[in-house]
Image (tube, rainbow, N blue to C red):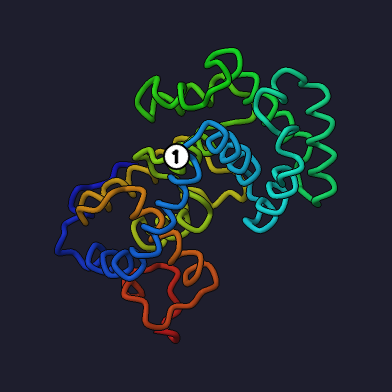
Amino acid sequence: MAISSSDWNPDSEIVTGIGQVVSANLTRANELFRDKKERTRTDDGQWLELVYCILAGTQVPVERARAAHDRLCVPENRARIALREVARNPEVALEWIQGELVAAGYRYPATKARAIVSAAQFFESEYEGRPSLFLQAAEPRELRIRLARDVSGVGIKIASHWLRNTGALVGTVDVHLRRFIESVVLHVDLADTGDHFPDGTFVLYERVLAEVADALDEPLPQVQFALWLYARERCSPGICSGCPLAGVCSRARPALF
């Protein structure tokens, strides 16, 4: 589906409303972005962030993904979850990671344990065990293609999530932003297929976010974070009262304007 440039006329009601939403949430969005960049300054930080993005990548509630990540990455486990340790002892690591995820009540322990091990082996064999070398190797969209191609269990969505969190200028779309884009911008349900969110649709929605950021003259990651905060806190629970986009949202509840 093509996105018409007229959809992003800076004077349009949609862009004006989105601008108000972004402006109201931009301070928190900047804080989130700075925090993630700070946490991922080192190879170790980049690796642990990828572990989190793998765990958060398949319709798993944020709280459950964080709990599983925290269990794997507590200080007493840092030697076991270290990239080189996982890469050099994959069978031991696979069994341990899967056991920890089961203990954390995580939904996909075997699949995600394999993805974490695969990622460690990729960085160890191709980039000396240093994610920072990988991040310097090409522009972000090429990097995510490499990750999706070469790491089992890491697709374009997980790769985009991780790259954004390391400071790359890419967008990422979760269930909250997906609903926001469909109801406010496109007025369609292109991705209304349960857990299935095809890569082609993801790229389309990422382009929508990029065009929004361009129209607002704000950096893409910060716009994405600002809209994500709003969509998670207001749109997903159906809090429409006072929303500047209620008049153009296909899911708005008129009685609550």
- Type of amino acid under label 1: Thr
The x, y position of residue 248, in whole percent, is 32, 69
What residue is rendered at 64% in x and 30% in y?
A: 153
The x, y position of residue 131, in whole percent, is 51, 26
- For residue 218, side relative to residue 250 (left or right): left
Which residue carries the number 1 mark? 166
What residue is rendered at 69% in x and 50% in y?
A: 70
Give residue 240's quadrant in the image.
bottom left
What residue is rendered at 76% in x and 43% in y?
A: 76
The x, y position of residue 23, in whole percent, is 29, 67
Q: Secondary structure at mark 1?
A: loop
Q: Which quadrant, please, contains the C terminus?
A: bottom left
Query: What residue occupies the far top of the structure in this picture?
Result: 125
Q: Which quadrant, please, contains the N terminus?
A: top left
The foreground one among 128 and 55 is 128
Query: What residue occupies the far bottom of the structure in this picture?
Result: 255
- For residue 159, side relative to residue 78 (left or right): left
Query: How many labels were placed on the picture?
Result: 1
Give residue 44's quadrant in the image.
top right
The x, y position of residue 234, in whole percent, is 47, 72
- For residue 164, side relative to residue 119 (left or right): left
What residue is rendered at 65% in x and 27% in y?
A: 83
The foreground one among 50 and 174 is 50
The foreground one among 197 and 126 is 126
Q: Residues within 10 Å of mark 1 (few under 14, many from 20)?
A: many
